[in-house]
Image (spheres, rainbow, N blue to C red):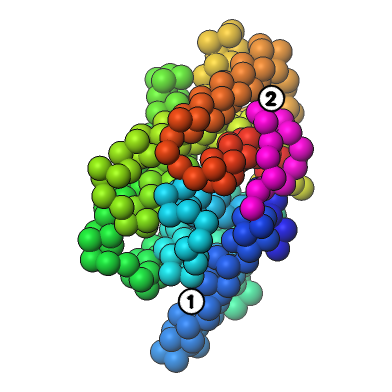
Amino acid sequence: MANDILSGKSRGGIPRQPLPALAAEGLLKAVEATLEDFLAHQVTALDEVDLDLGGFARTTRDLVLAGGKRLRPTFAYWGWRGVIGTHEPIGPVLPALGALELMHTFALVHDDVMDESATRRGRPTAHRLFAAQHRDAGRIGDAKRFGASSAILVGDLCLVWADQLLAQTALTTATLFAVRACYDRMRIEAVAGQYLDVLGENQPAQWSLDQALLVARYKTASYTVQRPLQFGLALAGRSRDETGAIDEAYHRYGIAVGEAFQLRDDLLGVYGDPAVTGKPASDDLRTGKPTALLMIAQQLGASFDLETPATADQLEHQAEIIVETGAVAQVESLILQRVEQGVAALAGAPIHDDARAALTELAVTATHRPA
């Protein structure tokens, strides 16, 4: 599998350095293999109970393995390597890294139900898949409702599977408690951020840029960058006295780069190419999501009725207005500022140089991406 997160040319004025071989060639394959092996056993177990359950498990497995950037395991890996160094084998921590991807699938599937999204990663979303299965089988009842109900259960199952896979990590009891504490905090913050996101969609006229950035911090920065880094730090099994400075650097880097990641998502949600993003164009405008991009555009004089569904022509016009206000340029500037802040946070951190180089690279590639 090509590592599309760790390749590309220099962008944003941040120096680029080649990454160690494992990052470029082995990490994602190792995580993928861990997930495939774990999920194969889970599918078999449910198949033995009932064939329909086996089919449900296979659809869930396919959603987990349907590509994606695998950013959370990648950040966790480098958070761990920053402390542990280059010589420790990755095998013992692979279940923990894979668990983050199962948690991510839970969040994506539930998010797609809430947003009524049609596609994800270029494929039908979970609720659309199950609705189609309902129609194809000629079942009674409402296919759309069946699809949404089944997708919610897919997300629930992934969250349980994430716990099971995490429990397979070879850790001491003390380290496991520290890892679980970070993992639980990450899950709570992801749910909190998602609720704020839903709340904003239902009262867009009352929303502000500060609230949009708060959503970015909790819904995205926390569980995409900051907490995975600190999760990796916890996996290293060191005491707080040994890792306090690293924890602070990961915190500052994680919030800055995580917010930049969400700001890029805001731009892609309006201007991204569906063939590349795997999601419909102008999805955020269609749903009236009060993102930082829209809040900035309104501050700069744009006027939108976010409470009334817009036609395709109106969405295209709104996208043009946002550019004309200068909001896109301002968001690009905010992204660059945050990337520079994140990289600066690592400058004096007592972490291994290969991890510093990798995280510097990731700060750029994760926030200057086409999808």
In the rendered image, the quadrant that contains the C terminus is top right
Determine which residue is flagged by label 2: 13
Circle 2 residues within 10 Å: few <14, some 14–19, many ≥20: few
Q: Mark 1: few, some, or many residues within 10 Å (few <14, many ≥20)?
A: some
Would you say residue 127 sits in the magenta stretch?
no
Query: In x, y percent, where is residue 236?
Result: 37, 56
> Percent from the top left, x then y, of residue 64?
55, 65
Question: Residue 312, located in which quarter of the rendered image?
Answer: top right
Q: Which mark is residue 270?
A: none
Residue 151 seen in this snapshot: no
Residue at 71% over, 13% down: 324
Q: Which of disc 1 and disc 2 is earlier in sequence? A: 2
Residue displayed at 62% across by 59% down: 22
Write down the region rendered in magenta.
6-20
At 66% across and 11% down in the image, what residue appears? 325
Residue found 48% across the figure and 70% down from its top: 91
Q: Is residue 15 magenta?
A: yes
Label 2 or label 1, whichever lies nearer to me, is 2
> Is 85 in front, or is 77?
85
Return the x and y of residue 147 as percentages of the image width and height: 51, 63
User: Please, what is the three-letter code of the amino acid marked with disc 1?
Assistant: Phe
Asked whether the viewer can see residue 88, the reply is yes
311 or 331: nearer the eye? 331
Q: Is residue 332 above or below residue 368?
A: above
Q: Quadrant of residue 271?
A: top right
User: Disc 1 designates what residue?
Assistant: 38
Q: Is residue 43 left or right of residue 301?
A: left
